[in-house]
Image: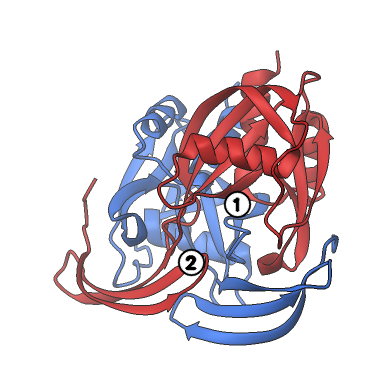
Chain colours: A red, B blue
Amino acid sequence: MRKFEEKTIATEQIFDGRVIKVQVDEVTLPNGKTATRELVKHPGAVAIIPITSEGKIVMVEQFRKPLERSIVEIPAGKLEPGEKPELTAIRELEEETGYGAMDLDFIQSFATSPGFADEVIHLYVARNLFEIAQPASLDEDEFVELMEVSIEEAEQLVKEQRIFDAKTILAIMWAKNNLVK
Amino acid sequence: MRKFEEKTIATEQIFDGRVIKVQVDEVTLPNGKTATRELVKHPGAVAIIPITSEGKIVMVEQFRKPLERSIVEIPAGKLEPGEKPELTAIRELEEETGYGAMDLDFIQSFATSPGFADEVIHLYVARNLFEIAQPASLDEDEFVELMEVSIEEAEQLVKEQRIFDAKTILAIMWAKNNLVK
């Protein structure tokens, strides 16, 4: 797990933001030479595949400033400091969809951009959903629109690139392989 | 595609690195209020699923500084300015594996971290591989070890978290659904 390890010689802090931090590390390479590594530090996130009683996936459409357009994604959100991922998952599911879940199962964790960022997403499936009477609301700078899509509709949205992010494409493949009989 | 659009009022350049740029945008929200968005600009990348004549996937193990460990991934690399993704794919396949491919087919493009980065990966499958006598070499700060793994072995590596990134997990699912009869 430490093959070709790059040891840090020096760290320069570049940016300490609300969501991300940025630093440049000087490292020693396996051949003894040095190189720089530009690193984005992210708190990590959860993503949830909420499955309705009709076998549809609840998704949210939202504007993503880095892409300068809105895309359709499974619900997701950042970990708060010290928060356990499954609690983040329950919180974000409620905030983004208004649903609670009788069953929440962990699927797997994965890094999104290991070349430059440490972000890890913890993926869950939420089943036996119920509507929460007065759900916690979104952050005040979040605007999302809810959709419930079948797996076939989701695959069509992938073709049209309205679904365009790795976690959601991975989630649809997982749902197709594990939920469709 | 522009639902809930966030219009940029001002942009502050934070960092202009070798790989990434970082900026903070002040934006107008759909409700007229303002907010800040921290954005990582990335040149984009390709990833390749190289399939051998035995149906194995060629993968590379490399140290990923953001994760502080080595992981097993499908070959991938950043786009050079103005470079067409399929040429990047051919170049990175040669540099990282020593293979050329008689057939290179586009699968799909996806954003890796749409909440804070604009990185898009273009995913290809490479078939009918041949060894290149004197392949172009890696960048001088790149160290990778080659592996050829069956889909079953790849799924085991995912369970062990030696495979840990979204693009490679997505690639294994794609290969299982599209290549295994």
Dividing the picture into quadrants, the one containing residue A35 is: bottom left
Q: Distance between the residues labelled 1 and 2?
A: 27 Å
List the single residue furthest toward the left: A32
Q: Which amino acid does label 1 sit on?
A: Leu
Q: Which of A127 and A91 lies nearest the eye of the viewer?
A: A91
| Residue indicated by mark 1 | B123
| Residue indicated by mark 2 | A20
Q: Which residue is drawn at 71% across and 63% down?
A: A141
**Residue B145 in view in this figure:** no
Q: Is mark 1 on a helix, strand or loop?
A: strand
Q: Quadrant of the N terminus of chain B?
A: bottom right
How many numbered badges does the structure rendering display? Answer: 2
Mark 2 is surrounded, within 10 Å at the Cα level, by few (under 14), some (14 to 19) or many (20 or more) other residues, namely some
Q: On the rendered structure, is B159 left or right of B47?
A: left
Q: Is mark 2 on a helix, strand or loop?
A: loop
Q: Label 2 is found on which chain of the structure?
A: A
Q: Which amino acid does label 2 sit on?
A: Ile
Q: In which quarter of the image is the C terminus of chain B?
A: top right
Q: Which of B71 and B143 lies nearest the eye of the viewer?
A: B71
Q: Which residue is drawn at 14% across and 71% down?
A: A32
Residue B180 x %, y %: 57, 25
Q: Residue at x 83, y 39 (%)?
A: A147
